[in-house]
Image: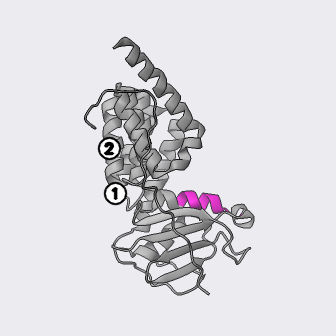
Amino acid sequence: MAMAVPGVAAASRSYSLACTPRPPAPRRRGPITPRRRGPITPHASAEASIEIRVCTNRTCVRQGGREVLAALGGLAPPPPRIEVASCGCLGRCGAGPNVAASVPGRGTAVFAHVGTAARAARLLEHLLGAAEFDADAGLAALAVREKAEAALAEGNAAEAEALFTESIGLNAPGGLHLVYGSRCKARLVTGDTAGALADAEEAIRIAPKFPQCHLSRGDALFAIGEYYSAEDAYGDALVLDPSIRRSKSFKARLEKLREKLVSVSSSS
């Protein structure tokens, strides 16, 4: 029996951060053999938007569901081509981590035992076809990106930047918006604000509906001193995902921004 997987619609209304009044200004390889249930036709057309849902219920989490969710998010082409999110129980507990894939007009299937990044990559190759998604290239780029993330977490921003650049050069079939966003962070640490902004804007070009790309752009603009433009960028992220308003990191961004805007208003 095919299992329907609900999609996630982006917010269409606009938000004002209301930090402070401001004057008007211009905006600046082998085939996967999945265990599944429900019909699905592999190699979806490039026009179709595929929804992937990873079970993060208790049993699947114990079997690596959260790690698979992170791997799929890091490997997949960005929305709207692939929408990756967590979900509740998909059935077949004990055979997880279970992953549901839904292609409009082609059906829905639940794939069992998707327990590693390699299996996640093979699943994407199965769904998209080897011509669009090269699993080996995706895994190679992901491995380098994970080394870069570790270096950045340890405070080695220059090393991280070099590794992110290496990952970008591998021409992975997905996840590039995440790599550019992470290199933006590394460049902000090293003081290369212009390079950080360029990376954030490239991430937005690749994945305009990914909120973190707009947050990265806001961070880069803040570092440059373009505070009103940073406010706009944070607002763009909020439109795409209103839930980020509740996150500690977003609240911290707004507090820093308010302080700068008050200072700018007082001095003008």
Q: Residue at x 38, y 74 (%)?
A: 48
Q: Residue at x 40, y 79 (%)?
A: 43
Which residue shows up at 30% across the image and 39% down it? 198
Q: Amino acid at mark 1?
A: Asn
Q: Tag 2's secondary structure? A: helix
Q: Residues within 10 Å of mark 2 (few under 14, many from 20)?
A: many
Q: Image quadrant of residue 36?
A: bottom right
Q: Which mark is residue 171?
A: 1
> What quarter of the picture does the N terminus occupy?
bottom right
Mark drawn on residue 201: 2
* Residue 49 disc label: none
Along the viewing direction, whichever of 265 and 134 lies nearer the viewer? 265
Residue 3 % position (x, y): 60, 80
**Is residue 80 visible in this depiction of the protein?**
yes
- What segment is highlighted magenta in the picture? 63-71
Q: Is residue 122 visible?
A: no
The answer to whether residue 90 is left or right of residue 249 is right
Amino acid under disc 2 = Glu
Q: How is the image coloured?
A: one colour
